[in-house]
Amino acid sequence: MVEVFLKTVPFFALIGLGYWAGYTRFFSEEATAYLTKFVFYFALTAMLFRFSANLSFEDVWDTNLVAGYLVGTLAVYLIATLVGYLRKLDVATTAVEAQCAAIGNVGFLGVPMLTLLLGEAAIGPIMMALAVDLIVFSSLIVILITGSRDGRLSFGVFRTVGLGLIKNPMIVAIVVGLMWSFFDLPIPAPANEFLAILGGAATPGALFAIGASLASKSAERLQIAGWLSFCKLGLHPLFVAVGVLYLFPADPYFAAVIISAAALPVAGNVYILAQHYGVAPHRVSAAILVSTIVSILTVSSIIAVVAPT
């Protein structure tokens, strides 16, 4: 475990450096927003396209892996939803808490960190987890919040969800890359070098941006943040492990990757959604902050347990 922890230290050190830059205002919130846009729309997109263009659909899609991950994630989502219901929260707030409990920072933290820790073969399962999170659960929260406010589900809700998916650069990069691979199209050497250089900025840029954005997060509602962090860092990898190891047995290596992805802290895009819809942004902010700090120890521990020796 110590060896794995030491390997994760540089990643969290970059997050810490970003936090320092944001906390001291060396990096303003506006600068952090623009860095995040650069990583999201350019660097990470280039990395995902380059990876997926060299994969086949079979490398990404594994029925047992998808089923195990989906069942495990849905189980945690439902547990958080039930707890929210028992606490008499409204539908929108319950949906936001469930999203915190089940959706991790796979894009900004998982893609760069897990591919380096577990090998480039890990990119297929990681992209699968990212696709499930974005297509299924990011769509679900929009449907629940909008539907609860309107009192019904309208065509406009599904139109909004569809446009959101089409405009998401990570989804577009994965789909276009897989199509590129399917048609066996070569990537010209200059273009490949361009993508490699641009994609190389994704790891330090994403980690620095995570840290800088955490500096603006509040530490309010720590009791709720602790509960949601427990769900995300403890229950989520546990239920996903049951899903991919017992209910839908998958390849041991791929299972280890997907369990590690499930162990990641709360995703930053949950805060963006909460802020956009005006639903409990402060409790999401606290959950992201607490889960990211605690994950310094929990992520390395889980990777050490599940990673092939």
Image (cartoon, helix red, strand yellow):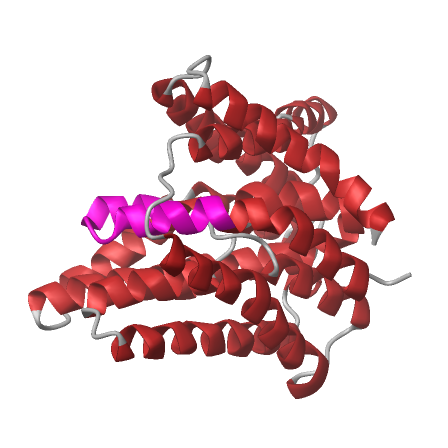
Tell me: residue 11, above or below residue 275: above
Residue drawn at x 50%, y 71% is 73
Viewport quadrant of the C terminus: bottom right
Residue drawn at x 46%, y 75% is 74
Q: Residue furthest right?
A: 309
Is residue 177 something one can see in this rendering?
A: no
Q: Residue furthest top?
A: 26
Residue 288 highlighted magenta (yes or no): yes
Viewport quadrant of the N terminus: bottom right
Q: Nearer the viewer, residue 135 or 190?
A: 135
Q: Is residue 12 left or right of residue 138?
A: right
Q: Is residue 159 left or right of residue 75?
A: left
Residue 163 highlighted magenta (yes or no): no
Tell me: residue 34, above or below residue 276: above
Residue drawn at x 51%, y 55% is 104
Q: Nearer the viewer, residue 185 or 85?
A: 85
Q: Is residue 91 left or right of residue 249?
A: left
Magenta part of the chain = 271-290
Is residue 269 something one can see in this rendering?
A: yes
Percent x, y of residue 173: 52, 43
Residue drawn at x 73%, y 33% is 10
Image quadrant of residue 303? bottom right
Q: Is residue 241 left or right of residue 85?
A: right
Tell me: residue 57, above or below residue 280: below
Image quadrant of residue 193? top right
Percent x, y of residue 260: 68, 59
Q: Residue furthest front?
A: 223
Percent x, y of residue 291: 51, 51
Instruction: Name the main secondary structure of what is drawn in magenta.
Output: helix
Percent x, y of residue 54: 72, 47
Tell me: residue 246, above or below residue 251: below
